Each structure stands twice: as structure tokens, then as C-alpha cells.
């Protein structure tokens, strides 16, 4: 079952969770390895991981005695599609925009100084 966009964006709102996702882009990691770079308790990291798992962004599985975390990149697809719907406009090329303004309004003082 896919998580709602609200759940995904709530999970992504925290910088620690975004960093965990970035780390998991490289490879699956044991929970203790995920916790290593952070200055917080293993319990706190486990809470972050639970939020990411609830959002469907990661999958946790036990391999022997070790709990592993794996990124589920497909979980970000609905959020990505939603965000791309706002990108329907072409990005502004500032050089073209400046040239347009010069044609319409004439050269500016800064332009004259650069010549």
C-alpha cells in the first residue's frame, strides 16, 4: 500500500531523515551503521527509521541478528510526479531575459559601464 503524499512529505521534512535516505542511496545499511554518523541515541535513530518505513521510503528486514535498512526509490515517485506538475513552465534563462529587457527598455547604466 502506497503511503500518502502527506506522510511522505512529513518524513522528508526532517534533515536527519533526508540524510539517512542519502546514505541509503549508496547501499543497504545495518541500523547501527546508519546511526554511527549522528550524535543521537540508537533509539532516536530507530524512531527516524520507523517514520521512513511508515512512509514507505525504506524497507527494514532482519538478517540474522542484524536489522538492515534498504531504500525503496519507487516510494518517492508519487511525490516526484506531484512536484513536477508545478514545473510545467520553462525555467527562465537570465541571459535571454536580460537581452529582452535591453531590447524593450534600452541599455541600463550597468550595461554601459561594462562596454
Image: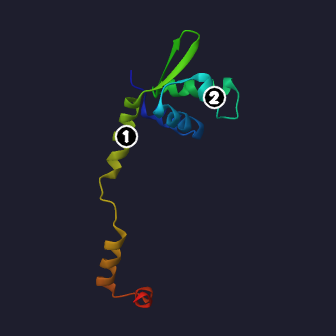
Quadrant including the N terminus:
top left
Residue 5 occupies quadrant? top left
Residue 35 in the image, given as x and y percentages of width and height:
63, 28
> Is 6 displayed left or right of 65 in the figure?
left
Residue visible at 70% across and 35% down in the picture:
39
> Is 43 displayed left or right of 109 in the figure?
right
Question: Of residues 8 and 115, which is closer to you in this image?
Answer: 115
What residue is shown with label 2? 35
Residue 33 in the image, given as x and y percentages of width and height:
60, 26
User: How packed is label 2: few (under 14 Cα within 10 Å), some, or many (20 or more)?
Assistant: some
Looking at the picture, does residue 78 appear above or below residue 66?
below
* Label 2 SS: helix
Question: Of residues 96 and 62, which is closer to you in this image?
Answer: 62
Residue visible at 58% across and 41% down in the picture:
15
What residue is shown with label 1? 80
Question: Of residues 86 and 110, which is closer to you in this image?
Answer: 110
Residue visible at 59% across and 10% down in the picture:
65
Q: CA distance from mark 2 to mark 1?
A: 27 Å
Residue 43 in the image, given as x and y percentages of width and height:
67, 23
Looking at the picture, does residue 29 appear above or below residue 25?
above
Quadrant including the C terminus:
bottom left
Residue 78 occupies quadrant? top left
Amino acid at each position: 500500500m502506497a503511503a500518502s503524499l502527506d506522510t511522505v512529505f512529513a518524513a522528508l521534512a526532517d534533515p536527519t531523515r533526508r540524510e539517512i535516505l542519502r546514505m541509503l542511496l549508496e547501499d543497504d545499511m545495518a541500523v547501527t551503521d546508519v546511526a554511527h554518523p549522528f550524535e543521537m541515541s540508537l533509539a532516536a535513530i530507530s524512531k527516524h527509521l520507523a517514520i521512513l518505513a511508515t512512509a514507505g521510503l525504506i524497507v527494514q528486514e532482519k538478517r540474522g541478528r542484524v536489522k538492515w535498512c534498504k531504500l525503496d526509490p519507487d516510494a518517492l515517485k508519487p511525490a516526484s510526479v506531484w512536484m513536477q506538475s508545478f514545473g510545467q513552465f520553462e525555467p527562465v534563462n537570465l541571459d535571454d531575459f536580460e537581452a529582452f529587457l535591453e531590447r524593450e527598455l534600452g541599455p541600463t547604466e550597468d550595461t554601459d559601464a561594462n562596454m
